[in-house]
């Protein structure tokens, strides 16, 4: 069993905690279109893919950003050790990645009030 455990899988795990904060607080958090509650909070999401994070709050513009996966330095430790099965396990589980950034803190912008009067 130990022969097939991988450095990143053991140390990184297959998920990553991301801290999400907004000012003002209590914005709805959507990650890849799924609801994750309101800000501020720490979410635990899969490392193996990029993720779209959206914040919505009444009276404020929607803010959207992306969490991008990058290969973790821990993945390369397997290569330095000549541990190819570990690299394969890390690749298969997605634990070879780290999500960037690991914290999102944003200032929401008040929505502009639309002019209701038309000029004649």
Image: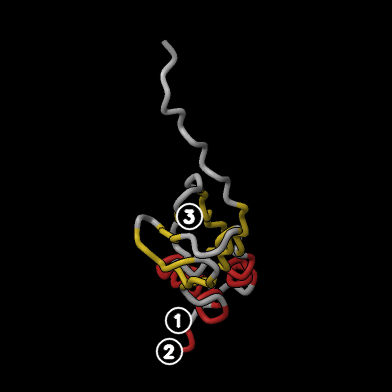
Q: Are marks 1 and 3 in contact (CB under 8 Å)?
A: no
* Residue located 61% across and 55% down the image: 106
Q: Is residue 3 visible?
A: yes
* Residue located 50% across and 48% down the image: 60
Q: Disc 1 versus disc 3: distance between alpha carbons?
A: 40 Å
Quarter of the picture containing the C terminus is top left
* Residue located 42% across and 68% down the image: 37
Q: Earlier in the sequence, mark 2 or mark 3?
A: 2
Q: Position of residue 114 (x, y in %)?
A: 46, 32
Of badges 2 and 3, nearer the viewer stands: 3
Q: Position of residue 67 (x, y in %)?
A: 52, 55
| Secondary structure found at label 2 | loop
Q: Are marks 2 and 3 in contact (CB under 8 Å)?
A: no
Q: Is residue 63 above or below residue 20?
A: above
* Residue that numbered label 1 is attached to: 4
- Mark number, residue 55: 3
| Secondary structure found at label 1 | helix
Q: Disc 2 versus disc 3: distance between alpha carbons?
A: 42 Å
Looking at the image, residue 77 sits to the left or right of residue 2; the answer is right
Q: Are marks 2 and 1 in contact (CB under 8 Å)?
A: yes
Q: Is residue 98 visible?
A: no
> In the depicted view, which residue is nearer to us: 105 or 100?
105
Q: Is residue 27 above or below residue 116?
A: below
Q: Disc 2 versus disc 1: distance between alpha carbons?
A: 6 Å
Q: Earlier in the sequence, mark 1 or mark 3?
A: 1
Badge 1: few (under 14), some or many (20 or more) residues near its Cα, within 10 Å? some
Outermost bottom residue: 1
């Amino acid at each position: 069993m130990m022969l097939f455990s991988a450095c990143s899988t053991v140390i990184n795990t297959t998920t990553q905690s991301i801290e999400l904060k907004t000012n003002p607080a209590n914005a709805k958090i959507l990650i890849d279109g799924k609801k994750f509650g309101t800000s501020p909070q720490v979410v635990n999401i899969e490392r193996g893919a990029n993720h779209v994070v959206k914040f919505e709050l009444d009276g404020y513009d929607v803010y959207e950003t992306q969490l991008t996966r990058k290969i973790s330095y821990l993945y390369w430790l397997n290569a330095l050790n000549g541990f190819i099965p570990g690299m394969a396990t890390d690749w298969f589980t997605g634990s070879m990645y780290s999500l960037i950034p690991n914290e999102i803190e944003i200032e929401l912008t008040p929505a502009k009030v639309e002019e209701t009067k038309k000029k004649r």
